[in-house]
């Protein structure tokens, strides 16, 4: 957090001095007046105004910086487009070696998403949900999950035994639950503790 204390003949002058030092604008700063100052009489008894100006941290921008820094250290330069919808923040990643950021079954992407969410919410006044996507991977993964759900539901019905899936992040489990929500012959529920929480598909008897 960057902050400076500045003085001036007036509060306004002190604020402008502080903003210039921080290279920021008034809307991106928090201003505290320490001393309003005193004009004095014919120059006698004058006291300068003193203010403390603190730069506001943009949590979404911090998340973007984090992703760029980590990606560069992994040797995968990326371009990032940010989308905001209420409390949901989506980072769309693109680049030549983007597959390295996705990883096997999206594990690297999921880990980066979890860490980015921690970074953002450390600086945010309200809780924000983060989604990372790369080259439309999430859409393709969702289609794969829906197909997997339908196939394993058939297996559960055919064998009469419950089917336990591998651990998944919460939003992927939600895709499975939603896909089988109206299935007449199976029910789904989550079991286990994060990060090993997983879905169970059980036949309805």
Image: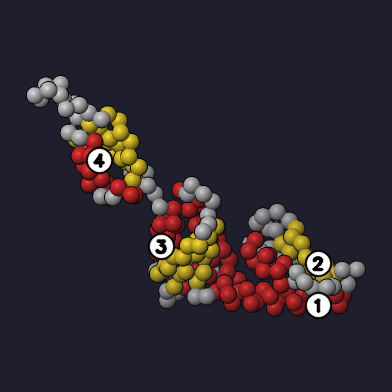
Q: Which residue is mark 4?
A: 15
Of the two numbered discs 3 and 1 on the same chain, state the one appearing first in sequence: 3
Mark 2 neighbour density, 10 Å: few (under 14) some (14–19) many (20 or more): some
Label 4 sits on a secondary structure element that is: helix
Q: Which residue is mark 2?
A: 187
Q: Which residue is mark 1?
A: 154
Residue 43, quarter of picture: top left
Which residue lies at the image location 40% right of the left edge and 52% below the top edge? 58
Of the two numbered discs 4 and 2 on the same chain, state the one appearing first in sequence: 4
Real-space Cα separation, disc 4 to disc 3, in angstroms? 33 Å
Real-space Cα separation, disc 4 to disc 1, in angstroms? 68 Å
Residue 70 appears in the picture as rendered = no
Q: Is residue 102 left or right of residue 12?
A: right
Judging depth in this view, the residue of 81 and 32 nearest the camera is: 32
Q: Mark 3 and mark 1 in contact? Answer it, CB < 8 Å.
A: no
Q: Which residue is mark 3?
A: 68
Query: Residue 190, percent across and down?
Result: 74, 60
Real-space Cα separation, disc 1 to disc 2, in angstroms? 12 Å
Q: Is residue 172 left or right of residue 26?
A: right
Q: Nearer the viewer, mark 1 or mark 2?
A: 2
């Amino acid at each position: 957090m960057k902050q400076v204390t500045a003085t001036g003949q007036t509060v306004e002058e002190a604020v402008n001095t502080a903003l210039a030092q921080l290279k920021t604008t008034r809307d991106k700063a928090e201003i505290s007046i320490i001393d309003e100052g005193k004009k004095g009489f014919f120059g006698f008894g004058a006291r300068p105004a003193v203010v403390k100006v603190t730069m506001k941290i943009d949590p979404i921008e911090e998340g973007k910086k984090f992703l760029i820094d980590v990606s560069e250290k992994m040797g995968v330069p990326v371009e990032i487009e940010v989308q905001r919808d209420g409390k949901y923040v989506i980072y769309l990643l693109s680049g030549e070696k983007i597959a390295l950021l996705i990883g096997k079954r999206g594990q690297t992407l999921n880990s980066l998403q979890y860490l980015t969410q921690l970074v953002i919410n450390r600086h945010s006044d309200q809780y924000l949900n983060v989604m990372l996507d790369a080259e439309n991977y999430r859409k393709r993964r969702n289609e794969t999950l829906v197909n997997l759900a339908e196939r394993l539901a058939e297996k559960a019905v055919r064998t009469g035994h419950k089917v336990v899936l591998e651990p998944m992040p919460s939003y992927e489990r939600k895709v499975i639950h939603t896909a089988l929500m109206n299935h007449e012959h199976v029910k789904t529920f989550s079991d286990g503790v994060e990060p090993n929480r997983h879905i169970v598909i059980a036949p309805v008897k």
